[in-house]
Every structure is written in C-alpha cells, then in structure tokens.
C-alpha cells in the first residue's frame, strides 16, 4: 500500500542545490517511492543554526515505505551526502525532514509526525503552502493560518527547483516530465 508524505529539504554548505536535486534522485532510486510534486526553491536565513543562507524546498511523495522506514531512508540519504552532526543545528550539507504522513499523528522514540517545529519555520511553511495551499497540519490546524506566526523570518523564492524556467508554478511531475525523474 502506498502512503502520501510531505518531506522538507534544506542545505547550506557544500553545493546546496546539487545536494537537494541528488536527494530527489536518491529517494526514487529504490523504486518504492515516487515524487508527485515539488515546490520552488527558496533561500532562507539560518534559524537556530549557523553558516550561510539555506536553500530549501518541500516535496510531496507517494511511498510504499512506512513512516519509520521512510525516516531511515531519509537519514541514509543525509549520511550519503556527507552530513555530520558535530553539534545540534550545525551547518549541513543536507537536511531531510519527514513533515507530514497524510493525516497521521505519530509520537514514537526518534519520530514525531507532523514534524514538531514545522509550523514555526517559514522555510517549511512557505514552500509547503505553495505546493499544498489547503493543507492541514494534524493537531495544529490549517497551514495557511499558521504562516503568520513565522512571517518575520527572512525567506525568498529563488525560482523553479531544478529547472531553468523560474516563472513556473509548483512542478506537478506527472504532467511535466523532468530530468530528475527516475521511473
Ligand atoms: P535533525 O538533526 O534536525 O535532522 O534531527 C534529526 C533527529 O530528529 C533524529 O534523531 C530523528 O530521529 C529526529 N526526528 C524526529 N521526528 C522527525 C521527523 N519527523 N523528521 C526527521 N527527523 C525527526
């Protein structure tokens, strides 16, 4: 059975855009996960973190993986991208967060869904609302109503994620085949 998930991507050292694109390819490589849509690429100020600005995006996926398996897969992709955790919120070559698992609420050791801080972060909320304007965050409410709570955080839309056409709307991958699609 396939489940619908939303994943947040971020990077601020190394080659951030390359790392985010490589993560999309890695995620689909097991043949059990399909990327349905991706937001534009955003640039954001580090929040509780250090170093240069981050590049961020949000993707919507269908996957045969259960939430725990998906988290492990995200962490293994982070590790492959050279991510180290020398201290909490260190600059990162790749950060992948499991934001939403449909309307499920999960509170387990090492796995909280919805991601507990997502509604406080403009770098999640702005791309999320671009992709899914009517989405609810289980336990918190309508995402559009929560955006005001992080309106003071610096973030700007850079353009399409992985495409030259910077004016395009959120990229529905079924409709518009791109070079990053693996299936
Ligand atoms: P970070 O260093 O910000 O990537 O946080 C990673 C830690 O958060 C790991 O210990 C994960 O087990 C834990 N975690 C809990 N819930 C989530 C989630 N929904 N997505 C990603 N990491 C999570």
Image: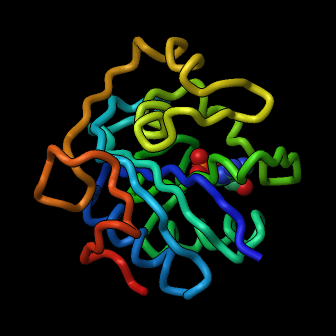
Q: Work out whether residue 69 or residue 50 is closer to the camera in this orientation and state it.
A: 69
Residue 139 image position (x, y, % from top left):
80, 29
Q: Work out whether residue 14 or residue 99 is closer to the camera in this orientation and state it.
A: 99
Residue at image position (47%, 55%) is 59
Residue 23 image position (x, y, % from top left):
42, 69
Image-based side of 142 in relation to 17, left or right: right
Q: Residue furthest right?
A: 108
Residue at image position (83%, 44%) is 105
Image-based side of 72 in relation to 169, left or right: right
For the C terminus, the quadrant is: bottom left
**On screen, residue 80 above or below 127:** below
Residue 42 image position (x, y, % from top left):
30, 40
Residue 15 image position (x, y, % from top left):
24, 61
Image-based side of 34 in relation to 131, left or right: right
For the N terminus, the quadrant is: bottom right
**On screen, residue 38 above or below 134:** below
**On screen, residue 107 above or below 46:** below
Residue at image position (59%, 19%) is 146
Residue at image position (68%, 64%) is 71
Q: Residue furthest left?
A: 164
């Amino acid at each position: 059975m396939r489940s619908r998930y939303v994943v947040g991507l971020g990077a601020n050292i190394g080659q951030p855009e390359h790392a985010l694109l490589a993560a999309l390819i890695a995620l689909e490589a097991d043949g059990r996960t399909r990327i349905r849509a991706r937001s534009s690429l955003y640039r954001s100020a580090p929040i509780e973190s250090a170093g240069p600005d981050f590049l961020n995006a949000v993707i919507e996926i269908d996957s045969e993986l259960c939430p725990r398996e998906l988290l492990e897969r995200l962490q293994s992709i982070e590790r492959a991208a050279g991510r180290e955790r020398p201290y909490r919120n260190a600059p990162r070559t790749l950060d992948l967060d499991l934001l939403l698992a449909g309307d499920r609420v999960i509170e387990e050791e090492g796995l909280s869904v919805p991601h507990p801080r997502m509604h406080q972060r403009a770098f999640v909320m702005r791309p999320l609302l671009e992709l899914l304007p009517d989405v609810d965050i289980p336990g918190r409410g309508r995402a559009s109503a929560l955006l005001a709570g992080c309106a003071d955080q610096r973030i700007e839309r850079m353009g399409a994620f992985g495409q030259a056409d910077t004016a395009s709307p959120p990229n529905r991958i079924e409709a518009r085949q791109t070079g990053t699609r693996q299936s």
